Amino acid sequence: YKMYKVIMHNDPKTTMDFVTMILMRFYEKDLPQAMKLMMEIHEQGSGVAGIYPYEGAEFRVEQTTALARTAKFPLSCSIEPV
């Protein structure tokens, strides 16, 4: 079955610590992986947080967006086929 990339987008408000925590909590990254990916998102404007079947990708985007809004951050993600 088809796999999908969850792409996390940089913005000027969401903190680096919050992005790192999200990557560890919802995308199964350890601290070094999460920090490296957070810097890539920060410096390049976006980065692939993970690759999942569609439902898994959609679920993680919903979790990420919900927690970001609760924390008053505009963090956004998109889904693209691999």
Image (cartoon, rainbow, N blue to C red):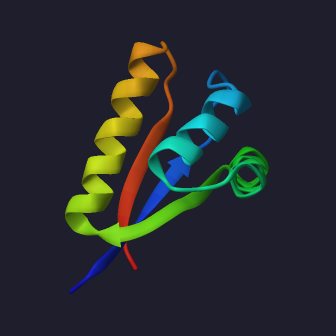
Q: Residue at x 64, y 21 (%)?
A: 13
Residue 59 in the image: state x and y as whole percent: 26, 49
Image position of 58 (left or right of 9): left
| Quarter of the picture holding the N terminus | bottom left
Image position of 50 (left or right of 4): right
Q: In which quarter of the image is residue 10?
A: top right
Q: Residue at x 45, y 46 (%)?
A: 26
Q: Which residue is drawn at 36% across and 59% down?
A: 79
52 vs 45, nearest the viewer = 52
Image position of 29 (left or right of 81): right
Q: How many labels does the image show?
A: 0
| Quarter of the picture holding the C terminus | bottom left
Q: In which quarter of the image is residue 65?
A: top left
Residue 52 in the image: state x and y as whole percent: 35, 69
- Give the answer, above or below, for where 6 lies relative to 8: below
8 vs 56, nearest the viewer = 56
Residue 66 in the image: state x and y as whole percent: 34, 27
- Give the answer, above or below, for where 78 lies relative to 68: below
Image position of 69 (left or right of 56): right
Residue 48 in the image: state x and y as whole percent: 55, 62
- Give the answer, above or below, for where 2 lies relative to 63: below
Q: Residue at x 76, y 48 (%)?
A: 35
